[in-house]
Image (cartoon, rainbow, N blue to C red):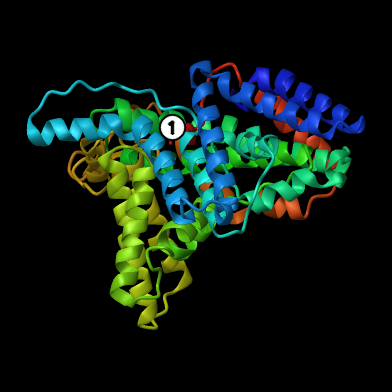
Amino acid sequence: MLFNSYEFIFAFLPIVFIVYFYLNSKRMVLGAKIWLVLASLFFYSYWNIIYLPLILLSIFVNYGVGISLVNSDKIRKLSSKTILTFGIVFNLGLLGYFKYTDFFLENFNGIFETNIPLPHIILPLGISFFTFTQIAFLVDAYKKEAKEYNIFNYMLFVTYFPHLLAGPILHHKEMMPQFASKYNYIKNYRNIALGLFIFSIGLFKKVVIADTFAVWANAGFDTATTLNLIEAWATSLSYTFQLYFDFSGYTDMAIGISLMFNIKLPINFNSPYKALSIQDFWRRWHMTLSRFLRDYLYIPLGGNRKGNIRTYVNLITTFLLGGLWHGAGWTFIIWGLLHGIALAIHRFWQSLGFRMNKILAWFITFNFINITWIFFRAKDFESAMKVLSSMFSLNNIVLPEKYFKFLSQYNEIYFRFGEVYDNILGKSNTTVFIIVGFIIVLAFKNSMENMINFKANYFNLFLSFSFIIYCIFQLNKISEFLYFNF
């Protein structure tokens, strides 16, 4: 089920909210938790009920492993490390089968010239997120930093519907105390108002901004056979903004919905396109994934504790695997590798004590991010090179005649007059949207800053409902979130 759908806004969310707080008002706390679990499982299986057994299997196995880790001192036959290894192998095996089987078989066929048929397995929604969430729980249980004896509490932690399909990636120790707090069993009208406010911002980001950029990005990457220089830059920038407003929009909606239930999800975005370095970018973008990669991959590999060369290798390895986590394809691996190399270069630059002008630092950082997103988005290497080569080619420059008549003497010499955005289905408003995109991400406060300064007044109430009502009239087309595919 999509947050940006009539079924969710007018049926699912109101019913779940009303019943949950009604049960709590009758002191049926366990009943309220079970209701939230059942609602979350319905939310998940609404897309395809065939994958309901999969998430239940994952939950029950991980719960059993977690219990074993908590009680590992009482189990003499198996060490806690063996139990943890089994849990991680199970989770990665499940993720690997559904996400990477086709990829590995396709490459095996190519290398060894075999003809093994591809099963074309449909990727279950949210499998990367609920898998990472549970791996984090198992590692924390192994370290004796988390424990859970109640199956319903654990199911609620994993399936809690606001974060289930696309994050944020949660920690057991930051969520369960909130579900256990008696103060959260009562409706908090300020949290409801704040939740609606943040939800409306996220909905507007997705429906109005991201989906508008999606038209040009999809046409440029998937439909157009050739791109002129301006179209190529418009294609890459459209996807850069689409991805940000799409994913941060989902996160805003998740945080807003959760606030209505008095549960605070961790911040996942902090104006990442304002970053002045690649390290700064990863401290601002998909922050819960960055935290997971740091705590459960980079640091166990040795982090920065074993010398500079090993640190660079650990950075590149971490982001190489982070790229593979995002998708089963060589373009994702290239994207992760480029980011890992960039982080290693940045660390080396820092070690030399050099400083860079802030404007230049932002320009280099943003353009690196924009260019590498091309590999993240492209279906294959050829598509990526189609966009990338056109961005830096001076052989196909098209300019609108009405704005550049004074250059007519150079027409057909250095450029040609024509429809600038014809190949990506764009018009003059494409330029306007790109400029507005820059203004929003660079000049405006982000959602979390607005949340901190929120005041429950008539203006914010009007703003929230204006956003929601406008977006409701735009929900006639199905538009899934990009990170559902990861």
Q: Along the horizontal axis of the image, is 169 left or right of 446? A: left
**Percent coordinates x, y for residue 100 in the rendering:** 31, 34
The quadrant of the image that shows the N terminus is top right
| The quarter of the displayed image where residue 146 is located | bottom right
Residue, disc 1:
485
Most extreme residue toward the front is 76
Amino acid type, label 1: Asn
The residue shown at (73%, 18%) is 11
Residue 71 visible in the current orientation: yes
Residue at horizontal 82%, vertical 39%? 193
Q: How many marks?
A: 1
Q: Position of residue 388 (x, y in %)?
A: 26, 45
Which residue is at a point 66% across and 17% down the rendered structure image? Answer: 7
Looking at the image, which residue sits at the far left? 113
Q: Residues within 10 Å of mark 1 (few under 14, many from 20)?
A: some
> Is 466 located above or below residue 415 in the figure?
above
Lateral position of residue 88 relative to residue 169, left or right? left
Q: Nearer the viewer, residue 429 or 65?
A: 65
In the picture shown, does residue 26 fall above or below 128? above
